[in-house]
Amino acid sequence: QVQLVESGGDLVQVGGSLRLSCTASGLIGDILTIMGWYRQAPGKERELVASITRTGSTNYADSVKSRFTISRNNAANAMYLQMNSLKPEDTARYFCKANTWLNREVWGQGTLVTVSS
């Protein structure tokens, strides 16, 4: 069974930086294709933050462009999100999602990011 585990969430001040990580396990006979970071703030719907294909093509929500950078390490089955110039509105639980070659869609449990003003 494929599992995703996120880490790196924390309490940070406005203007600060954080790096989130997502690591996959259980990929026997399967590979990760497109991966993405999503976030959900209290009382709001989950939204896409950024996504990245296996070949490195990226897509960002307008609200995070130029501040966040998504990357991945295919050999390590890992994905990262470098978040700079954090704002209070970035406060949310951040989830990792991955699709696989065998058409599985997997979500992590999330990691909490709190930006304090």
Image (cartoon, helix red, strand yellow):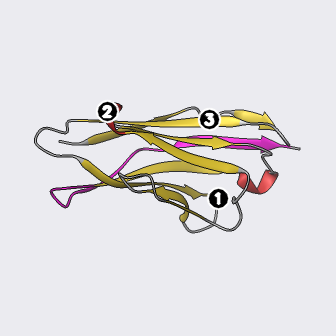
Q: Residue furthest right?
A: 117
Q: Is residue 8 left or right of residue 53?
A: right
User: Which residue is at 17% across, 42% downward?
Assistant: 1
* Amino acid identity at mark 2: Ala
**Between 42 and 83, the one nearer to me in the picture:** 83
87 in relation to 76, above or below: below
- In the rendered structure, which amino acid carries the disc numbered 1? Pro
Q: Give residue 102's mark.
A: none
For residue 26, above or below residue 60: above
Residue 75: which numbered mark, if any? 2
Magenta highlight range: 100-116
Q: CA distance from mark 1 to mark 3?
A: 21 Å
Name the residue located 57 percent from the left edge and 56 percent from the top edge: 39
Measure how far apart labels 1 and 2 are at the Cα level: 35 Å
Q: Residue 4: x percent and y percent?
A: 35, 40
1 or 2: mark nearer the eye: 2
Q: Which residue is mark 1?
A: 42
